[in-house]
Image (cartoon, rainbow, N blue to C red):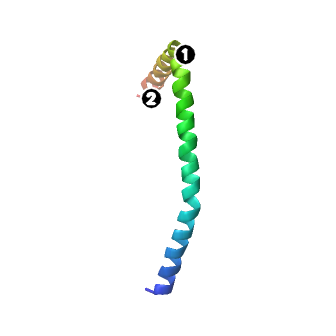
Amino acid sequence: MDTTVTGKNAERTHDSDDGLRPRIEELKERMETLNDQVKGFIKAHPTACLMGALGLGYLFARIARRRS
């Protein structure tokens, strides 16, 4: 195996890793923000969220039953 090819591949991997790291951190922050917003909505509207969850569960059960 040619070591120059291996070295270039390792360099490309390192370069792309440096470019992805800030993007990953940004996505983590956005997910935390979204999580906080969802928690706030659930605390403000617990009954509506419970009814929505029950409705979705019912629909998924109906779909699953049809496929069986």
Q: Nearer the viewer, residue 16 or 29?
A: 29
Residue 54 coordinates in the image, percent (x, y): 47, 17
Image quadrant containing the C terminus: top left
Q: Residue drawn at (46%, 21%), measured in percent from left and top?
A: 57
Q: Residue drawn at (51%, 12%), measured in percent from left and top? A: 47
Local crowd size for mark 1, using a 10 Å CA cut-off: few (<14), some (14–19), many (≥20): few
Q: Residues within 10 Å of mark 2 (few under 14, many from 20)?
A: few
Please give left or right for residue 31 compared with residue 3 in the image: right
Q: Is residue 1 positioned above or below 64 on the image?
A: below
Which label sits in the foreground, 1 or 2?
A: 1
Spot occupied by residue 4 in the image (x, y as percentages of width and height): 50, 86
The reply, left or right, for residue 33 in relation to residue 1 is: right
The Cα atoms of the two marked residues, 1 and 2, are separated by: 33 Å
Q: Residue at x 56, y 59 (%)?
A: 20
Q: Residue at x 44, y 27 (%)?
A: 64
**Amino acid type at mark 2:** Arg
- Callout 1, which amino acid? His
- Residue holding disc 1: 45
Q: Residue 14 shows which numbered tag?
A: none
Which residue is under mark 2?
Answer: 67
Pick whichever, 44 or 50, lies toward us: 44
In the rendering, at what x and y percent does residue 66 appear?
Answer: 46, 24
Closer to the chain start, of discs 1 and 2, is 1
